[in-house]
Amino acid sequence: MEKTVLTTRPFIPPGIDHLVSEARLHQSFACCVLPLIPLRAEPTEKSEQVTQVLHGQLLMKLTHQEAWSLVRVLDDGYEGWCATKQLHLLASEEALLLFESPRVLTVPPTCSCKTLDGRAILPAGSRLLPGEQVIDKGITDEQRDPVSLAMSFLQTPYLWGGKSVMGMDCSGLIQVVFALCGLLLPRDASQQVSIGTRVPHLGMAGRGDLAFFQNEAGAVVHVGLLLDGERIVHASGCVHIDRWDEHGIYKEGSATYTHQLQQVRRVQG
């Protein structure tokens, strides 16, 4: 049976749970009612995009500066600046009740939906607010595991801070597909590497495990999702499949390694 939505109470793993608990002491909240909103490093349109807020995600308003608001995403504690005019303000009681209620998330890479403001195309992982509904067909239960979901984003262009089929970065891809499977992960690869358990031997690594890659200084700078012991799907240039081994990601076309493997981690199962 094809489905367009997933109803879930997502698991918040140790590492970001304390950020979420702080929300219960906060007073100023907002919600994204657009298909998505860019969050930027500084309060200006010229500043880099650090992540995106998907439709229905809840935000804590921390401070403001002229036409900009510094916000924190409740799902992962990530902070950034967005244009205040793009926010839909919520009372604290309404926001907290909504945050702790079961979530109805869109599953296909894009979904035509009836929203509170009319009709919109929403990216995968968007949360339908009360009164909203999907008017598209979806995917099957068999397609709703992290690997199958990641494969549905093949050829999505790389976009720093992106989290939709219109553009994604490496950790944005991972965060979205695991959220659809009921697990909230931190935003960046350097944060995601703290979740789950390390696979002690690469011969034990397999489908659904996360592979992390480091720069010359040893810092985690990239993440991908293993298809099996030889192939990995990741966002670099676009979302695509490459070979991997104990050294890193191997680009067959150029016969070179593009990313140096640091470790493999299992975050579920």
Image (cartoon, helix red, strand yellow):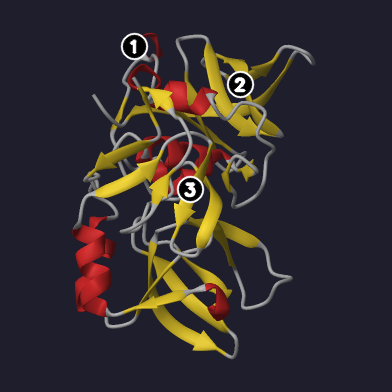
Coordinates of residue 160 in the picture (x, y in percent): 64, 50
Q: Which residue ends up furthest to the right in the rendered image?
A: 254
Which dot, 3 or 1, sits closer to the camera? 3
Checking the image for residue 204, the label placed there is 1
Give the left or right position of residue 165, taking residue 255 as reference.
Answer: left
Residue at image position (36%, 44%) is: 105
Coordinates of residue 5 in the picture (x, y in percent): 36, 38
Task: Identify which amino acid the numbered label 3 is placed on.
Answer: Cys
Residue at image position (47%, 64%) is: 33
The 10 Å Cα crowd at callout 3, few under 14, some 14 to 19, many 20 or more, is: some
Q: Quadrant of residue 77?
A: bottom left
Q: Quadrant of residue 29?
A: bottom left
- Mark 2 or 1 closer to N-term? 1
Q: Secondary structure at mark 3?
A: strand
- Mark 2 or 3 closer to N-term? 3
Mark 2 lies on residue:
249
Distance from disc 2 to disc 3, alpha carbons, whole Å, reads 38 Å
Q: Is residue 68 above or below residue 115?
A: below
Task: Identify which amino acid the numbered label 2 is placed on.
Answer: Ile
Mark 3 lies on residue:
113
Distance from disc 3 to disc 1, alpha carbons, whole Å, reads 41 Å
Task: Identify which amino acid the numbered label 1 is placed on.
Answer: Met
Q: Is residue 11 above or below residue 238?
A: below
In front: 129, or 50? 129
